[in-house]
Every structure is written in structure tokens, then in C-alpha cells.
Image (cartoon, rainbow, N blue to C red):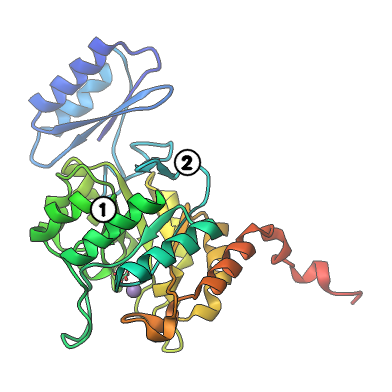
Amino acid sequence: MIINMSERATEQEIQHVIDRIKEAGYQAHVTRGAERTIVAAIGSGGRRHELEALQAAPGVEAVVAIAQPFKLVSKQVKPSGTVVDVAGVRIGAGEVVVIAGPCSVESREQMLSTAHAVKNAGAVMLRGGAYKPRTSPYDFQGLGLEALKILDEVRHATGLPVVTEVMSTEDVDAICEYADMLQVGARNMQNFALLRCLAKVGRPILLKRGPSSTVKEWLLAAEYLLAGGNSQVVLCERGIKTFETETRNTFDLAAIALAKELSHLPVIADPSHGTGRRSIIAPLCRAALAVGADGIIVEVHPCPERALSDGPQSLDFQGFEMVMRSLQEPLASIAKPAFATSGAA
Ligand code: PEP
Ligand code: MN
């Protein structure tokens, strides 16, 4: 249930509602908007009728049931969008945020040259995997701590905040020491022990959608983070498994639009993993932004043919510059509906 306080509700009235929610056996989560405060009653097993009775409490405008199984991530609880601040980069604030970098951190030189190239082309954050979730145990697994130290050096040298994947609860402290944002990879979206642990860290989280997860499951995974105390969460659509084999995954544009409709959390689009094909990254970046994504994350490598992971979907520096240039063209130039271009019937 959510308790919408009236615009004129006093601090005392808000506190009274919080106290009553707790007495009724629920947790109270307070969201203070520019105009009004919303208090969400979260949990199960409490006395629901006591919440309904808060309709009569002073300062309360309405008591409304939350229609969705996810609560704190729901737009109903926070109609205005959340802005997630990653070391000064504001995701969800209106400006398109571009995150770029290689799939894996391979060397200091590789990261430094990539960071400078993507920054010059307009990226505002750097990506790079230190711990890699690989389908085969014989593939490159990432440089681990050595990679984290490289990321740390490069973020200081370039001023670009870095995002890197966390695969296990035991690596959380080390990654928090060296990275500005922690990525929960697609394969770990429903690793609930990891989510519970990340709910307690003071770092923003980039939560990728699982390859076989519904939008509801994705939002419920985000709910673990918010319910546990971390409200700095960014969703990332990276494609799902379908029968199609020409692309690595099926990049789900509808999921981006739907996540924006259902939730107040920012959404980032990952067409690199979403397609597995560098040749179609530019149009899909544009499509993702057209359906409401707050930014994009793309893989860039100094020499994709030598990449230790995900070379076929990685852009080289020139390719990335071209993608960035294409993002500056007005979207209208690609949206030529048939009735505008066809001649007389
Ligand atoms: C990655 O970002 O390199 C990665 C492994 O992503 P995903 O979890 O989406 O496959
Ligand atoms: Mn990758």
C-alpha cells in the first residue's frame, strides 16, 4: 500500500504515518518529492486493515494499493524519475549518458588508450570487466584484482567513472574500493544472495536483465536492492534468448519502454550484447534512445580482432566515433514514414 500525503502535510503528520505503518507490522519507505511525500508500507503478514484506516489520519490524502508485485521500484511510489549519480555522472537526469569500453580489462595500455579514445568521442563513463562470466571454463576469465587496479588508475588518469561486473559476494569489498558502479551481469540477475549483499553497499548498481527473464522478474530483482536499502539502481536491457540465431540475443526495445513506464529507475541500453553484431549498434542505439532509454553502454576495443572476449560485437575507436556522430543527428531524419516519402498513388 502507498500512503499519499497531502501537499500541506507536516513533518509530524508524516512521522505519525510512519509510526502507524510500523505498528501495523510493515516497513515504511519514505519518498520525498518536490511537491508531496509518499510513504510506502512494504512487507507481508501485517494488519492490512490498519493501513486502510490511515485514510482518516491527519495529513493523508489517499491510501492506494500498489497494483504490481514490485513496490519500491514502481512508478506509483515515485512518479518522478530517479537520478542515479555515479561519481558526478547523473543517469536519468535528461542527458543521454554514454558508457563505453572493452568487454574485459586486458592490460593497462588497452584500458588507457580506450579510455582516452572514448572520452574524446563523448563517452562519460568507462566499462571493463575484471571478473568475467564465461560460458566455457576454458575461456579468459578476467584479470581479477589486477584488472581492478588498472581500472582505478585509468579512472584517475581520465576522470571517467568506471563500472565493472561483480560476480560473487566475496569480491564486493574489493570492487567497491576500485570502481564507481557495480554491474550485476545478466547471468546473476537472480542471484539473490548477491543482490542482498549489494543492497547494503554505498555504490550505484547497474542491473542487467537476465537472458531468460521477464520484465517483471527484472523489476523484482531491482526490488531486492531497493528493499535492502540501495536506491541507486540503473536497469540495463541487454537482450534475451529467442529462436533467432542471426543475432546473439534479441534486443528487446519494448522492455525498455515498458520498464520506463512501470518504474522510476533509469534504463540503459546495451546493444553490444543485445545483438552481438557491431554493424547494427548505431541504429539500435538510436532506437533505444527513441523509446526512452536514459543512455547506452557499448563495447569498444583498440583492436577487436585481438579481443580476449566479445571481439565480434566490439567497435574499434573509429567505429565508436561514428556511432557517437550518428547519435547527434536528429532522430527525425531516420523516421521517414511511408506516407511522407511515397509519391502520388
Ligand atoms: C558484459 O557486460 O561484458 C557482460 C558479460 O554482460 P551480460 O551480463 O549482459 O552478458
Ligand atoms: Mn561482453
Q: Which image quarter holds the C terminus?
A: bottom right
Q: Is residue 78 above or below residue 293?
A: above
User: Residue 76 at what x, y percent from top left?
Assistant: 36, 39
* Residue position marked by numbered label 2 in the rendering: 93
- Whether residue 179 appears in this view of the structure is yes
Quadrant of the image where one finds ligand 1: bottom left
Please tell me how crowded label 2 is: few (under 14), some (14-19), or many (20+) other residues with Cα within 10 Å.
Answer: some
**Circles 1 and 2 in contact, beta carbons < 8 Å:** no
Mark 2 sits near ligand 1, with its Cβ under 8 Å away:
no
Asked which secondary structure carries label 2, the reply is loop
* Residue position marked by numbered label 1 in the rendering: 179
The residue under label 1 is which amino acid type?
A: Ala
Q: Is residue 331 above or below residue 227?
A: below
Q: Is residue 31 above or below residue 247?
A: above
Per the model, the C-alpha gap separating discs 1 and 2 is 22 Å
Mark 1 sits near ligand 1, with its Cβ under 8 Å away:
no
- Whether residue 165 appears in this view of the structure is no
User: Residue 46 at what x, y percent from top left?
Assistant: 9, 35
Of residues 140 and 194, which is closer to you in this image?
Answer: 140
Q: In which quarter of the view is residue 64 placed? A: top left
Please tell me how crowded label 1 is: few (under 14), some (14-19), or many (20+) other residues with Cα within 10 Å.
Answer: many
The residue under label 2 is which amino acid type?
A: Ala
Of residues 72 and 145, which is closer to you in this image?
Answer: 145
User: Residue 184 at what x, y percent from top left?
Assistant: 24, 61
User: Residue 239 at what x, y percent from top left?
Assistant: 39, 72
- The structure residue drawn at horizontal position 21% and vertical position 48%, both measured from the top left corner, is 225
Most extreme residue toward the right, as rendered?
344
**Drawn side of residue 122 relative to residue 208, left or right:** right
Between disc 1 and disc 2, the foreground one is 1
Of residues 233 and 157, which is closer to you in this image?
Answer: 157
User: Which is more N-terminal, label 2 or label 1?
Assistant: 2
Of residues 44 and 158, which is closer to you in this image?
Answer: 158
